[in-house]
C-alpha cells in the first residue's frame, strides 16, 4: 500500500489500516508507513475458501464526523479484489509482471513454470509453452518454446519470449498442454508506450535562440518517408489543446481495438443451475412461438471463480478444444427469490484479469516584425539515409514553439514527440496597441521592457519618427533608466494618427554602457541581444460611413475590338484620402461568385433564410461548372465544404414537424415560404453532398398539410419576403413559388401538390396585377410546359419592360430610392428580372430560346452585381445567380483568347484565355476613376468590374428614424463603461418593415460588455444578437411607426484621445435601400 496526503506527498510514518473481508469473516490489520509512505504485507490465503476476498486500504479506520466550522480532512480509500483461480492440476505458469511502461522496442517476456510430474503424460520427455499476444483487434504475435523434462528433480524454470510488435495495452497469454485433459495458463496486460513501426524523431539544433536566428530542424524517420512538419506558437495549443497530435490521439481514433471478451453472437454461457440443470435454460422474456426462440436471449450463468477458459476469453481468443479448461458447474442452493420468473442475474464478480487492464490514458540585431501563429507547415521527403535537416529562421515572437511531425512510408506510420524551441531575448520590448483607430484620434502608445538577465542594465528606448503620426511633446518624460533582474518598466507616448491604412510604429531599446550604479550594482551589457527593435502596425480607418459602388461591363466580341466608355458615379463629399478602387477582370460570368462563395452579400446572415444564401448559389455554380467541364477536384472540395456546413447549420432551424423558420424552434410555427426554399435547395444539393432524404420529404409533407382545398398554399409563420405580402397577390405569389420549388426539387408534373397548386394559379387568371407575381408565374408555367399561359404572361411582361443602352430589365415599383449618389434599383427588381430570364431559358425546346434577348437581360443583371459576385440582398442573389449560371452554361465556349485594356490615367492590360478564365485578375488603384474606358480584342466574352470604395459623412434617409443616447452624459465620474440607448422606428410607406438589422460599430478602444447578448435578447423584438469584428448586429422581427428602445453597455479597453464618433445603422434586411444612420460618442 502507499499513502499520500492532500498535496500528493507521501504520508511518512503514519498508521494505516488494511480491511480484509472474506467468506470466513472480516479482519483488520494495522501497519505503519515507511519514509516513502509505503507498506508491504503478506497474507495467508489458506482459510479464504472459494469466494472472492475484498481488500480495502484506509488512513482512517472510521471517518471523523462532520462538525461545522472545523476543517474536514478526508482520505480516499484504496480497493482491490482477489478471486480464487480454479485449476485441476498441481502445475502452474506465471508471467512476470512489469509495473512500469515498456519501451516501444521490446524486451523479453519472462514466463516462469513449475510443472508437477503427475500432470504430464506418462514418460513425457518434453512439453511446450505457448505465448499469444492480442491487441489491435486480433493476434499481433505468437511464439512457442519446447522444454525438456529432466529425469530427476523438479520441473521448473523461466522461459524468455522476445516480442516486438505491441499495441499500447497488449494482453499476453501463456499456456501449456501437459496431457490430454490438463492445461495450465496465465494472462496479464502490459502497459506499453504507444508507438509505431516508423520510428520518427524531431529536434531543433538549439533549445533556445534569439528571434531572427537560424536554427536547424533535424528529422529522422524510415528511409523514403514523407513527413508533415508543423510548428506553432504554444498559445495556439493553450487555446486549443485538442489540436495537438500525439500517439494517444492517433490510437484513440480506433475505439474498439482493445476490447476484450467475446461479441454477443459467439458468447458462451453455462446453463443457470438455479432454473434447472437438466433442462434447457429459460429465456429472459416469455417466448410467443417456437420460431421466436431462435432470436431470444437466454439467461446466462456466471461462475464466481476464474478458470483457464476465462483467461482465453479475456484475451478475445475463441478456442475449440476437448481439454478441461472450464470449472465444472456445481450444485448450488438457490434462494427462493431467485426462482421468480424472468429475473436477470447480475454479474457476481469479474475476472481478476480485468483488474490488470491498462488504465485509460485518458547574430545580427534586427527589427522584429514577423509574428505568426503557425511557423512551419511543410511536407518534407526523407531520403535513403533516413535523416533530413531543414534550416529555418526563428520568428520574432517571444514564445515557445511546439514542433511535431508525422510520417508515412512503406514500413508504416510514425509520429514524433513534440520538439520545443524557446525564442527568447535577455531583454525585450512589447507594444500595447488598439486594433484600429479613426484618423484624428489620439491614443497612449505603451511600450513595456522586460529584463530577464541576472544583472541590472541601463536601457534607453526610442520611438522612430514618422510622417504617418504625430507625437505630443512631453517635457518631463524620461526614456532611459535602470532595469534590474526579473523586472519590467513601461514607457508611453501620446500619438495622433494622420495617415490612413496600416501605420507602423518602430520602437528600439538598447542596453547602454554605463558607470552609473543601478540599485547599488554595476550594470552589464549582454553579449547577444543587447538591442531589441520592434515594429508593429496599427490600422487607421477613415472617419465617416463606408460606401461602395461597383460598375460592371459584360463585353463580347468575335474577332473585332469592342469599346465601352464608363462613368463611375461617386458622392461629391467623400472623406479625403478614403477613396480607393479595384479593377477586376474575369473570363467567366460566374467567376466572381466562384471566387467569393462565402461572402456573396455584404450583410449578416444569422437566421434560417439568410443562411441559405451561402448554400443555394453554390449549387448553381457547381451545376454550371459541371455542365461546362470546368469542375476540378479542388473546386468541388471547397464548395462541398461550404455545402456541408450550410446544411448542418440549417438543420438547427428545423422544427419537429419538418418545417423551417427564421429562428428555428424559438418561433412558434414553421414558415411556409422558407420551408419550400429549404426543400428545393436540399433536393438539388443531394447530387453533391449527403442530404438525408427525410429532411426533404418531411418539408414537402408539411407543405402539403397546409395546401387549401382550392390548391393555394396558406402562409404560415412570418413571411419576410417583401414582394409576397401586403397585397392581393400574396397568396398567388406564394403558391407559385412553392410549385416552382417542388418542380425544381424533382417532383413530377402529375404530383398532387403540383397539380392542385396550378389549379390555384389558373383560377387567379387575369386578376394578377403584381409584376413580381407575373414573373414568378411565367417561370412556373415554363417549368410545367404550359406554353399558352407562359406566352400570355410573357406578353404582359414585355409591355412593362424597360430597355435602354442595350440592356433590358423590369421594375417592381415606379419609385426609385434616391440616396443622392446614384440611381440604384430595388433588390426585388433584380429578382423579378432574373425570374423573367429563367422563363426565357428554361423551355424544353432549347432551339426556340432567344439568346439575343436573354443577353440584354444578362447585361443588366451583371451591372447590378457587387464586387463579390452577389447582389443587394439574399433572394435576388439566389435567383439571379441561378439565372446567370443557366445562361452561362448555354453560351459557354471553351476556346477563345481575349486582350482587355482598361484605360484610366494609365493603361492596364489583362489577358484572358481558357486556362485562366476562372481566375480573378485585379489591379488596385489609390483613387477612384470617374471616367475610364474598356477595350476588348479577341474572341469570347469578358466581365470587367471597377469597384470604388470610400467614406462619406452620414446622410439622413427618411425610411427609418434612429437616435442614440449615451450615459453618462459628462466626464466627471466616468469610469470607462458606456451605456448605449438606441431608439429606432420605421418611417416608410408600409405599416411595418421586414426583418430589420441594427448595426452598432464600437468606438475605438471599446468593446461590448460580456453580457451584451443576454441583455439585448430580453427585448421582445430582438431575435438574435451577433458580435463580429467590433460590430454588434441586432436582429429584429420588425419595426413599426412607434419608437423602440434597445440598450446595452460597452467597456473601454484602451484609452483613446480625441475620440471620433462611431456609427449606428438600421436597415430593412430585404430592402436594404431603406435605412438610416447616425453617430454617437463617449463623453470623454
Image: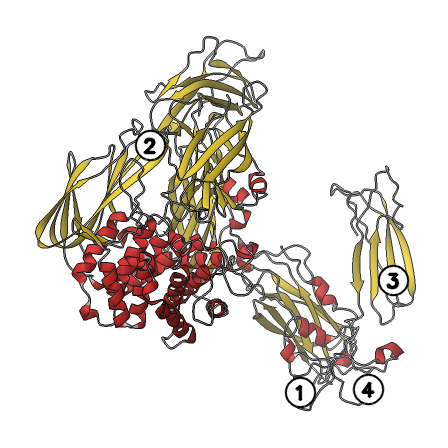
Residue at left 58%, top 11%? 520
First reached walking from the N terminus: tag 4 or tag 3: 3
- Mark 2 element type: strand
Front tag of 1 and 3? 1
**Above or below: residue 825 compared with residue 89:** above
Tell me the residue that label 3 is attached to: 21
Cα separation between marks 2 and 4 = 91 Å
Quadrant hosting residue 461: top left
Kindly identify which residue carries mark 4.
Answer: 276
Q: Nearer the viewer, mark 2 or mark 1?
A: 2
Q: Residue furthest left?
A: 560
Which sits in the foreground, 61 or 1031? 1031
Per the model, the C-alpha gap separating discs 1 and 4 is 21 Å
Q: Residue furthest front?
A: 767
CA distance separating discs 4 and 3: 32 Å
Residue 969 in the image, given as x and y percentages of width and height: 54, 23
Report the mark closest to the observer, 3 or 2: 2
Q: Secondary structure at mark 3?
A: strand
- Relative placement, left or right, of 754 versus 844 is right
Q: Secondary structure at mark 4?
A: loop
Contact check, label 4 and label 3, Cβ < 8 Å? no
Image depth: mark 4 or mark 3 in front: 4
Q: Which circle's residue, 2 or 1, is located before the other in the chain?
A: 1
Q: Please state if 551 lies on the left or on the right of 776 as rendered.
A: left
Distance Cα–Cα, label 1 vs label 3? 45 Å
Q: Nearer the viewer, mark 1 or mark 4?
A: 1
Q: Which residue is mark 2?
A: 951
Mark 3 vs mark 2: which is more N-terminal? 3
Residue 476 x/y as whole percent: 48, 8
* Alpha carbon separation for disc pair 3 and 2: 83 Å
Q: Which mark is residue 900?
A: none
Please determine whether, in this image, residue 751 is positioned above or below residue 775. Answer: below
Amino acid at each position: 500500500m502507499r499513502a499520500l496526503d492532500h498535496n500528493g506527498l507521501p504520508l511518512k510514518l503514519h498508521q494505516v489500516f488494511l480491511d480484509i473481508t472474506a467468506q470466513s469473516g472480516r479482519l483488520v490489520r494495522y501497519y505503519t508507513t515507511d519514509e516513502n509512505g509505503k507498506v508491504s504485507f503478506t497474507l495467508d490465503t489458506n482459510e479464504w475458501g472459494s469466494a472472492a476476498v475484498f481488500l480495502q486500504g484506509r488512513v482512517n479506520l472510521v471517518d471523523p464526523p462532520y462538525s461545522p466550522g472545523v476543517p474536514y480532512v478526508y482520505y480516499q480509500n484504496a480497493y482491490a479484489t482477489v478471486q480464487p483461480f480454479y485449476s485441476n492440476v498441481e502445475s502452474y505458469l506465471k508471467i512476470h509482471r512489469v509495473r512500469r511502461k515498456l519501451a516501444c522496442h521490446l524486451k523479453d517476456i519472462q514466463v516462469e513454470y513449475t510443472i508437477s510430474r503427475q500432470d504430464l503424460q506418462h514418460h513425457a520427455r518434453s512439453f511446450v509453452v505457448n505465448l499469444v499476444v492480442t491487441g489491435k483487434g486480433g493476434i499481433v504475435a505468437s511464439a512457442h518454446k519446447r522444454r525438456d523434462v529432466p529425469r530427476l528433480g523438479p520441473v521448473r524454470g523461466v522461459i524468455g519470449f522476445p516480442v516486438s510488435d505491441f499495441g499500447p495495452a497488449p494482453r499476453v497469454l501463456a499456456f501449456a498442454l501437459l496431457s490430454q485433459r490438463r492445461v495450465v495458463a496465465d494472462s496479464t496486460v502490459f502497459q506499453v508506450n504507444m508507438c509505431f513501426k516508423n520510428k520518427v524523431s524531431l529536434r531543433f539544433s538549439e533549445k533556445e535562440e534569439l528571434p531572427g536566428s537560424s536554427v536547424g530542424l533535424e528529422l529522422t524517420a524510415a528511409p523514403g518517408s514523407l513527413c508533415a512538419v508543423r510548428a506553432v506558437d504554444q498559445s495556439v495549443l493553450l487555446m486549443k489543446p485538442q489540436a495537438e497530435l500525439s500517439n494517444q490521439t492517433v490510437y484513440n481514433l480506433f475505439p474498439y481495438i482493445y476490447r476484450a471478451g467475446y461479441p454477443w453472437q459467439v458468447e458462451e454461457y453455462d446453463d443457470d443451475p438455479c432454473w434447472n440443470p437438466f433442462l434447457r435454460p429459460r429465456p429472459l422474456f416469455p417466448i410467443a412461438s417456437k420460431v421466436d426462440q431462435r432470436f431470444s436471449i437466454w439467461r446466462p450463468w456466471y461462475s464466481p471463480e476464474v478458470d483457464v477458459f476465462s483467461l482465453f476469453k479475456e484475451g478475445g481468443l475463441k478456442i475449440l478444444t476437448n481439454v478441461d479448461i472450464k470449472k465444472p458447474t456445481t450444485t448450488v442452493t438457490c434462494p427462493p427469490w431467485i426462482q421468480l420468473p424472468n429475473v436477470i442475474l447480475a454479474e457476481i464478480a469479474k475476472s481478476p484479469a480485468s483488474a490488470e487492464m491498462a488504465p485509460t490514458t485518458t547574430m545580427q540585431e534586427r527589427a522584429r516584425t514577423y509574428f505568426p501563429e503557425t511557423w512551419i507547415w511543410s511536407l518534407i521527403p526523407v531520403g535513403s539515409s533516413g535523416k533530413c535537416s531543414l534550416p529555418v529562421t526563428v520568428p520574432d515572437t517571444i514564445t515557445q514553439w511546439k514542433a511535431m511531425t508525422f510520417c508515412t512510408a512503406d514500413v508504416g506510420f510514425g509520429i514524433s514527440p513534440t520538439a520545443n524551441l524557446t525564442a527568447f531575448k535577455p531583454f525585450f520590448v512589447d507594444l500595447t496597441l488598439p486594433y484600429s483607430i479613426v484618423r484624428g484620434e489620439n491614443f497612449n502608445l505603451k511600450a513595456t521592457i522586460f529584463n530577464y538577465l541576472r544583472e541590472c542594465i541601463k536601457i534607453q528606448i526610442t520611438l522612430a519618427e514618422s510622417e504617418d503620426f504625430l507625437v505630443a511633446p512631453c517635457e518631463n518624460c524620461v526614456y532611459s533608466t535602470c532595469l534590474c533582474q526579473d523586472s519590467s518598466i513601461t514607457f508611453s507616448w501620446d500619438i495622433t494618427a494622420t495617415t490612413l491604412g496600416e501605420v507602423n510604429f518602430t520602437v528600439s531599446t538598447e542596453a547602454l554602457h554605463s558607470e552609473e550604479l543601478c540599485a547599488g550594482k554595476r550594470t552589464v551589457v549582454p553579449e547577444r541581444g543587447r538591442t531589441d527593435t520592434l515594429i508593429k502596425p496599427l490600422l487607421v480607418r477613415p472617419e465617416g460611413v463606408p460606401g461602395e459602388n461597383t460598375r460592371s461591363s459584360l463585353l463580347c466580341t468575335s474577332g473585332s475590338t469592342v469599346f465601352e466608355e464608363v462613368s463611375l458615379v461617386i458622392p461629391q463629399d467623400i472623406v479625403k484620402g478614403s477613396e480607393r478602387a479595384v479593377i477586376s477582370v474575369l473570363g467567366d460570368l460566374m467567376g466572381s461568385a466562384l471566387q467569393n462563395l462565402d461572402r456573396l452579400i455584404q450583410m449578416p446572415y444569422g437566421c434560417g433564410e439568410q443562411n441559405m444564401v451561402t448554400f443555394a448559389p453554390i449549387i448553381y455554380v457547381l451545376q454550371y461548372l459541371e455542365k461546362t467541364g470546368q469542375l476540378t477536384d479542388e473546386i468541388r472540395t471547397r464548395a462541398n465544404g461550404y455545402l456541408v456546413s450550410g446544411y448542418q447549420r440549417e438543420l438547427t432551424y428545423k422544427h419537429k414537424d419538418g418545417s423551417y423558420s427564421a429562428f428555428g424552434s424559438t418561433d412558434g410555427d414553421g414558415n411556409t415560404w422558407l420551408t419550400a426554399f429549404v426543400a428545393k435547395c436540399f433536393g438539388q444539393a443531394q447530387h453533391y453532398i449527403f442530404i438525408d432524404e427525410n429532411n426533404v420529404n418531411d418539408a414537402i409533407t408539411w407543405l402539403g398539410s397546409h395546401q387549401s382545398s382550392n390548391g393555394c398554399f396558406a402562409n404560415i409563420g412570418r413571411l419576410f419576403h417583401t414582394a409576397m405580402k401586403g397585397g392581393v397577390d400574396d397568396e398567388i405569389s406564394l403558391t407559385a413559388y412553392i410549385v416552382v420549388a417542388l418542380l425544381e426539387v424533382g417532383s413530377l408534373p402529375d404530383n398532387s401538390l403540383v397539380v392542385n397548386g396550378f389549379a390555384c394559379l389558373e383560377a387567379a387568371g387575369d386578376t394578377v396585377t403584381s409584376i413580381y407575381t407575373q414573373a414568378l408565374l411565367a417561370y412556373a408555367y415554363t417549368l410545367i410546359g404550359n406554353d399558352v399561359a407562359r406566352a400570355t404572361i410573357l406578353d404582359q411582361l414585355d409591355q412593362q419592360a424597360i430597355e435602354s443602352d442595350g440592356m433590358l430589365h423590369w421594375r417592381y415599383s415606379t419609385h426609385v430610392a434616391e440616396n443622392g449618389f446614384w440611381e440604384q434599383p430595388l433588390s426585388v427588381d433584380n429578382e423579378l428580372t432574373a425570374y423573367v430570364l429563367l422563363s426565357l431559358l428554361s423551355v424544353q425546346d432549347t432551339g426556340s430560346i432567344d439568346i439575343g434577348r436573354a443577353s440584354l437581360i444578362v447585361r443588366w443583371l451583371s451591372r447590378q452585381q457587387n464586387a463579390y459576385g452577389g447582389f443587394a440582398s439574399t433572394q435576388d442573389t439566389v435567383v439571379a445567380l441561378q439565372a446567370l449560371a443557366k445562361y452561362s452554361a448555354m453560351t459557354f465556349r471553351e476556346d477563345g483568347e481575349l486582350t482587355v485594356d482598361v484605360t484610366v490615367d494609365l493603361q492596364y492590360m489583362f489577358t484572358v484565355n481558357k486556362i485562366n478564365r476562372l481566375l480573378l485578375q485585379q489591379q488596385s488603384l489609390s483613387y477612384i476613376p470617374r471616367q475610364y474606358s474598356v477595350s476588348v480584342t479577341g474572341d469570347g466574352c469578358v466581365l470587367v468590374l471597377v469597384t470604388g470604395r470610400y467614406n462619406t459623412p452620414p446622410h439622413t434617409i427618411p425610411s427609418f428614424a434612429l437616435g442614440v443616447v449615451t450615459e453618462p452624459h459628462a466626464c466627471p465620474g466616468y469610469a470607462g463603461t458606456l451605456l448605449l440607448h438606441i431608439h429606432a422606428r420605421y418611417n416608410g410607406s408600409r405599416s411595418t418593415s421586414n426583418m430589420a438589422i441594427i448595426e452598432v460599430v464600437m468606438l475605438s478602444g471599446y468593446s461590448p460588455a460580456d453580457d451584451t447578448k443576454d441583455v439585448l435578447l430580453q427585448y421582445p423584438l430582438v431575435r438574435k444578437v451577433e458580435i463580429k469584428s467590433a460590430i454588434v448586429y441586432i436582429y429584429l422581427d420588425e419595426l413599426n411607426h412607434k419608437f423602440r428602445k434597445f440598450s446595452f453597455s460597452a467597456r473601454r479597453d484602451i484609452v483613446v484621445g480625441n475620440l471620433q464618433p462611431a456609427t449606428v445603422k438600421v436597415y430593412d434586411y430585404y430592402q436594404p435601400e431603406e435605412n438610416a444612420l447616425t453617430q454617437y460618442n463617449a463623453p470623454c
